[in-house]
Image (tube, rainbow, N blue to C red):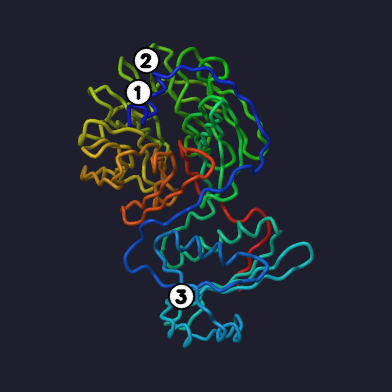
Amino acid sequence: MKYKCSQLKISYIIFGLLFYFVSFTSVYAALNLELTQGVNKALPIAVLSFSVQHNIAKIISSDLQNSGQFKVDQVDAPQQLSYGMHAANYAYWAGQKMNNVVLGSVEKDGKKYKVKFQLLDVYSKSVLLDKEYKVSKDDLRALAHHISDLVYQQLIGQRGVFSTKIAYVLVQRKIGQPTKHSLIVADADGHNPKQLLLSSEPIMSPAWSPDGKKLAYVSFEHKHSAIYIQNIATGKRHLVSNYPGINGAPAFSPDGRKLALVLSKTGYPKIYVLDLVTHKLKQKTFGWSLDTEPSWSATGEAIIFTSNRGGTPQIYQLDLASNAITRLTYQGSYNARASFMPDGKSIVMLSRDDNGFNIAKEDLVSGDVTVLTSSGMNESPSVAPNGSMIVYATNYRGRGTLAEVSADGRVELRLPSKEGEVQEPAWSGSLVGVRSGHETAR
């Protein structure tokens, strides 16, 4: 893998773009999430079918299994089913060596569906969660992910990310035809892919707004780079940066009011901050170095970025109040594409070692670096909003695909595509609740 692993490639790639919009419809097969490594002694849990007609239980089972934290067994449970939801046969589940059980029901209620579910603790013989929802048919999958989030948080103690989204670029190449580049938004498990944009040339640097309603990205439709922000629901977009030279690496501030970006107005790529309300632009780094790939801290008080000001690409932090710049990485000759973990105590980055380009995590207090992957052909890490997982682009069997690794390196997943090569992943922030309906705690 060459220097293209970093968004520093913006400084070296100039190409034309034939760019056009397509409707916000599902046109591609889902990515197939595959668990390749889980934690030892994963928690045994059973998920019973909610309904023969609906696959809510299957979605929950897949979510929990693919988190790597649970061992989901398919258990034939006629004894339990005869008891019903409110008379759990705890002795039966203890005999099956289950720690917990998820069970529920789905009933048609007018034009909507009434969904009930419980989470049982087998050994304390108690009901940990007992909730009821009323949603439309289109929201049943979203509700299943929401239930998975609740179960995960109750048992692991950390908010789940099953209801979040992932944006990525899909590249399709066919002999004798122009290459197609599509910007896709999908559920965190790879399902429900929606095509937002289609181009005959690369689409770069998708970045989520904090509320998950917009994406910023780079295009070259005017024969040079420009940054647009697009509304995901409506497909409408507007131009936010079209200066001569480089316009690249957009990143929303935590409050969504500002955009960090890279411009070469001075002749060298530098970090700027654009106020999206007042449209005022401020230059934040200076000098002859190449500064790129800005990423905000959770408080919005600092930006980390990649720079070669020390001779090789390394990670630096800019304090926005004082404009003081501090170098963060010293181990290795190449560190790039960094972002903060949600707690602000460490960063995740692309790091080059003797094994190539891998995803690594650095503790900002001790300076210790932990390499999380081993293939040596990885790029573009993006952290889940709860900090548990990192999605990244990799090469698998000669094709670009997405993969995920847990922040401790113990859980690994792969999201191969049947339609082409996948790159430039970006994980959304936490998306609240189900799109419609209500929740009742009983």
User: Compared to 65, does 314 lie above or below?
Assistant: above
The structure residue drawn at horizontal position 56% and vertical position 65%, both measured from the top left corner, is 58
How many labels sit on residues?
3
Q: Is label 3 in a helix, a strand or a loop? A: strand
Q: Position of residue 186 (x, y in %)?
A: 56, 46
Would you call the spot at circle 3 few (<14 residues within 10 Å), some (14-19), or many (20 or more)?
many
The residue lying toward the viewer, choosing from 345 and 180, is 180
According to the picture, the residue beneath numbered tag 1 turns out to be 291
The answer to whether mark 1 and mark 2 are in CB contact below 8 A is yes
Determine which quarter of the picture holds residue 315. top left
The disc placed on residue 268 is: 2
Check the picture and name the quadrant holding the C terminus: bottom right
Between disc 2 and disc 3, whose residue precedes? 3
Gap in angstroms between the C-alphas marked 1 and 2 = 8 Å
Would you call the spot at circle 1 few (<14 residues within 10 Å), some (14-19), or many (20 or more)?
many
User: Compared to 155, does 266 lie above or below?
Assistant: above
According to the picture, the residue beneath numbered tag 3 turns out to be 100
Gap in angstroms between the C-alphas marked 3 and 1 = 50 Å
Q: Nearer the viewer, mark 3 or mark 1?
A: 3
Determine which quarter of the picture holds residue 396. top left
Between disc 1 and disc 2, whose residue precedes? 2
Q: Position of residue 62 (x, y in %)?
A: 50, 62
Q: Position of residue 256 (x, y in %)?
A: 52, 36
The answer to whether mark 2 and mark 3 are in CB contact below 8 A is no
Between disc 3 and disc 1, whose residue precedes? 3
Q: Position of residue 78 (x, y in %)?
A: 57, 84
